Image: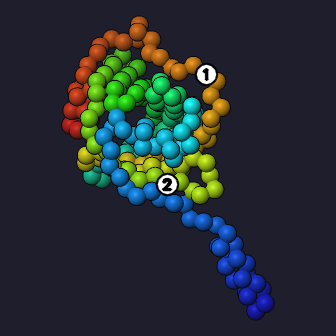
Amino acid sequence: MKRVTWFLLFLSLVTACFFKRPTVQERRCYLVGEIGTALSPLFGDPEALRGLFSFKWEKDETVTLLRGEFLYQRGQGVWAEIKDPWGRRVVEVWLKGEDYSVFYPKGGLLFVGKVKEEVCFSVNKPPLLKFPRGIKGNLGRFGWELALKEISEDVSSEFPSLDPSAIKGVFQIEDLKELLERYL
């Protein structure tokens, strides 16, 4: 029994030496329009990416969990479809530099504009993986965590665009920010 204990202890020490802990980038702050430039080197400066994500949003003691898929294409920006925990589409987001478009399909509402807020975050990138697996940060009083999954550079689909017939009203992005601060 003593030999087995020593063997297990030796085995756990040896395996611990081979597994490196994920490296966490120092927490830095950027303007929203600079996020793509800041993250691009961590992803290997790709032409295109597609993947899944889960998103945790916190304010005070309230936690909101969302999930979805994203598509990035150089020159086009980022598109994300965000769903609630039951798989229903909540919003679609387009981001190109500091230009944002957020579409709520349930009400047909489109929020557009430039976001010049500062966002602070750190990136979790395991040393043996090609892409980061998590980003954690805050935007004003809101804390958030983004977990990335199934990231692929094999992107053969068109960059999604908004169907103009689905839009029932267009508002400024500041209106959305005000709603989020008031009700979240």
At 40% from the left and 29% from the top, the residue drawn is 95
Residue 5 in sight in this render: yes
Instruction: Identify the residue position indicated by label 2 in the image.
Output: 124
What number is the disc on residue 81?
A: none
Residue 42: image location, x then y, percent: 51, 47
Residue 62 in sight in this render: no
Residues marked 1 and 2 touching at CB (< 8 Å): no
What is the spatial separation of the Cα atoms under label 1 and label 2, in whole angstroms? 28 Å
Q: Nearer the viewer, residue 49 or 181?
A: 49
Circle 1 — which element? loop
What is the crowding at mark 2: few (fewer than 14 residues within 10 Å), some, or many (at least 20)? some
What is the crowding at mark 1: few (fewer than 14 residues within 10 Å), some, or many (at least 20)? few
What number is the disc on residue 157?
A: 1
Residue 124: image location, x then y, percent: 49, 54
Image side of residue 57 versus residue 74, left or right: left
Image side of residue 61 versus residue 149, left or right: left
Residue 115 vertical position relative to residue 31 in the rendered view, above or below: above
